[in-house]
Amino acid sequence: MTLLTFASRQTWPQVLAILDQTPARLVLFHSDDPSESRRPAERVKDFAIATGRLAAEAIELVQVPTTDLKGLEDAIADTAHRLELGEDNCKFHLTGGNKLMALAAFDWCRSAGSPCFYIEKEQRVIAFVPQQGRLEQGISRTLNENLAAGVDPVDMVRCQLDAAEVVDGGQLLTLNADGERFPWQEIGPRMEDGRYDFRRLLHVEGNEPPARAGDRLELATAVVILKNGIPRVRRGIRTVSSRRSGDGRDEGEHDLVFNWRGRLWIVDCKDRVSPEQRMEKLRAELASAFFSDRARELIDQVEEELREKELKTLKEDLQAVAEAGGQMAKTIVVRRALPPQAMDFARSRKMHVVLRSQLFQQMQQGLFA
């Protein structure tokens, strides 16, 4: 079977279609727009080859117009004629591309007697089957939530990212025997005591990165995720901007990434002390000394400036995480605390927020919501 599809910025529906349909040949129609269509088509091709789904010679990229209906219809018909495609040996995936592309593809399927389908965000497959010269809507179904379970999360990240390239796949984490036996109720207390090394619960493949202040929260969060039934987690996938700007934000890192219930999940962990807590420590240190009302005003002013700077940084971090996974990804934010404005910002973008003090319970809510 040959799978025909339109490539677009959101590559995850294409990945799901390939995993679900297991085609022998893939045709990726794309426009001349590099970021919206051409590069996504190339990344889907690379994903299919890297994961062993298809051989390179079984994948074809075909450029088509985007605003010319007759040109679109001709490009589809010419490709189908050249590859000898018809009612018995192909399906058309309609999820990608614009409305004109979908219209041209639907019309070709109707005339050729070939089935087609599209995938909704909720991962329901809406199929259309040929019936007496027409296309009738068939029985819808939900994709198997374990469809991508065997795919390495780093391959999924590579497929989705456009403005960045993966330069380090990070570590692959699974539970070891001690981790399997470890009671989840102990994770919170061990996290708070500040001494327990969660690495003893994990089997780690990959090089250990330089030590950082947030390592314990990342590792504890990974244990929590794995204890909830996810088989493996990638930690520390590093990326570099493909259009380097020299502004110091060229490099990025995804703390934890995994596949679950047919989606790519990205977890962002930060264990920062809030500006309020830092200034409270300063006030406590200065409590025994005399300082003027003006000094107090300056301290309050510094606290407000720190709060605003922290909020801006938080929003930038959250926005970057949201963009990395695409529209069909799930994002979880793990923090020691989160200001109300940042909490509202995260929730408005459908991110699930987990506080360190309720790590297991709130993570479980996000995973099974």
Image: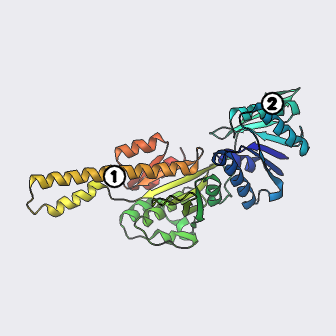
Q: Amino acid at mark 1?
A: Lys
Residue 91 image point, x, y percent: 81, 41
Classify residue 304 as left or right of residue 136.
left
Q: Nearer the viewer, residue 244 or 337?
A: 244
Q: Nearer the viewer, residue 339 or 232?
A: 339
Residue at screen point 83% across, 36% down: 74
Q: Is residue 78 above or below residue 332?
A: above
Q: Earlier in the sequence, mark 1 or mark 2?
A: 2
Contact flag, marks 1 and 2 (Cβ < 8 Å): no
Q: Is residue 67 above or below residue 283?
A: above
Residue 366 image point, x, y percent: 50, 47
Secondary structure under tag 2 reads: helix
Label 1 – label 2 distance at C-alpha: 53 Å
Instruction: Report crowding for label 2: few under 14, some 14 to 19, many 20 or more residues within 10 A (C-alpha).
Output: some
Residue that mark 1 sits on? 309
Q: Nearer the viewer, residue 3 or 350?
A: 3
Residue at screen point 69% across, 32% down: 99
Q: Nearer the viewer, residue 176 or 203?
A: 203
Q: Amino acid at mark 2?
A: Asp
Q: Which mark is residue 79?
A: none
Residue at screen point 39% across, 53% down: 313
Q: Which mark is residue 107?
A: 2
Residue 248 image point, x, y percent: 45, 61
Quadrant in which residue 212 is drawn: bottom left
Secondary structure under tag 1 reads: helix
Residue 64 image point, x, y percent: 76, 41
